[in-house]
Amino acid sequence: MITIDYKDRRPIYQQLMEKIEELAASGLIRPDEQLPSVRGLAVELAINPNTIQRAYGELEKKGIVYSVPGRGSFLASGQETLLAINRERSRQELAKLAARAKTFGLSRADFLADAAAAYDEGGTEQ
Amino acid sequence: MIVTRNVSKTFNDVVALHDVTLNVAKGAIFGLVGTNGAGKSTLLRLLAGIYRPNVGELTIDGESVWENLAVKQRLYYISDEQYFFANTTPLETAHYYLNIYPKFDIQRFTELMTGFELPLQRKINTFSKGMKKQLSVILGLAANTDYIFCDETFDGLDPVMRNAVKSLFAAEVADRGLTPIIASHNLRELEDICDHVGLLHRGGVLLEKDIDEMKLGAGKVQCVLPEGADIESLGLDIVVRDRRGSLLTIIARGTPEEIASRISALRPIFMEVLPLTLEEFFIMETEVAGYDVKTLFI
């Protein structure tokens, strides 16, 4: 369910955070569902347990995860959290698309028109 | 907690380590990086109590290691050259270690041997180099010590074994706070498993840092700026700069986000900001420190 890309230059804990946010946003982990244990994930991915602890800690600071002492970490409930994650994710995607459009010399108006069209057409996910 | 204070070690007129000061917290996975001859093995042997420092202090949990049996029972050293008694089998070796390490777990030893598909009753001198390495790791884990020192241990293992050993280390760190120190010249090997890294160079410590902080402490930027824009006007702490045609590549200190937002002010035509790999980070730091090690990590 969670994989690490070793070619990705970002710290592993950031990659982990992103993966968990993705799983939460897509509904594969539901609110109040337990996240994989630090030990289990460390063994599975052959990475440092301290790194996973750090990722969970940062997610907790962002309010995406809560922890129960002695039991583990759980996904926080609340639609706002999910909406915020999704919004953030789509912003990031948009920023990438915008950067590319700029590089190829697409005008702001054309880019916005394309975005609007995509939004209208893609009302349902394929 | 491992602490070395101004430790120096010389062999006749050769200075192997000079004024080394390092801290390794309990439960951390510490990577010891350095070029050949930087003093990695010497430092591990000092920590294992095989050598005695000429100058300085070296303690594990507040106690000196040299000739200190109580401390040495709590650490396991995997040498880069494995040594086993002549004509012994893994099982005999395990029974020998049983007398040395009070917490040696013989059941865990046999389980791990079975897991790695290594024979218990075959003579070790018929083992391949890689099998001997695996055996050393298994003995080290079964010894149940608080600290384990690995000298180039991962380098002789195939990718499947390497992953298995990393998983085992991860489990021990999570379960009982094992503190591994892993020496290697291969930075990529250490990038995924270590949380702290110390860089040795010519017998001294160049830097010692949290691996994530290191990655977020500088960024590499490739950008094309509009005519007349001056990257130097931004007040960025630029360490390395390189221009090829209109493409400008810089390495600057600061988090990648900070750097990106500063450069955005110049309205770049194209921009890509990447965190540094450990390799790039070390090359940058060694260059800043005035060493020319550009070609050594490649």
Image: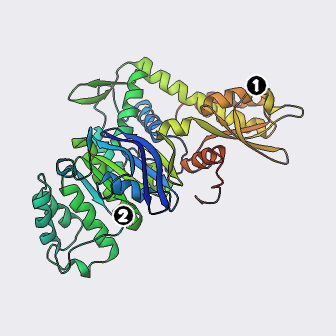
Rendered image quadrant of residue B111:
bottom left
Name the N-terminal-most of marks 2 and 1: 2
The amino acid type, in three-letter code, at marker 1 is Ala
**Quadrant in which the C terminus of chain B is drawn:** bottom right
Residue B40 shown left or right of residue B219 in the figure = left
**For the residue marked with disc 2, what is the amino acid?**
Val
On the image, the x and y values in percent for residue B258 come to 63, 28
User: In terms of depth relative to the viewer, which is nearer, B121 or A14?
Assistant: B121
The spot of residue A42 in percent (x, y) is: 32, 45
The residue positioned farthest toward the front in the image shown: B12
- The alpha-carbon separation of the residues under discs 2 and 1 comes to 47 Å
* SS for dot 2: helix
Please give the count of numbered marks on the rendered protein.
2
Are marks 2 and 1 in one subunit?
A: yes
Q: Residue at x 21, y 61 (%)?
A: B139
Question: Element under label 1?
Answer: loop
Residue at the image position 64 percent from the left and 60 percent from the top = B295
Q: Does residue A123 appear in the picture of this structure?
A: no
**Vertical side of B129 occupied by B19: above or below:** above
Q: Quadrant of the N terminus of chain B?
A: top left
* Observer-nearest of B278 and B118: B278
The residue that label 1 is drawn on is: B265
Q: Is residue A90 left or right of residue B132?
A: right
Front-lying residue, B50 or B211: B50
**Circle 2 is placed at which residue position?**
B160
Q: Position of residue B268 (x, y in %)?
A: 78, 33
| Contact check, label 2 and label 1, Cβ < 8 Å | no
What's the residue at 50%, 27% (across, down)? Answer: A86
Decide: few, some or many residues near mark 2? Use Cα within 10 Å; few <14, some 14-19, many ≥20: few
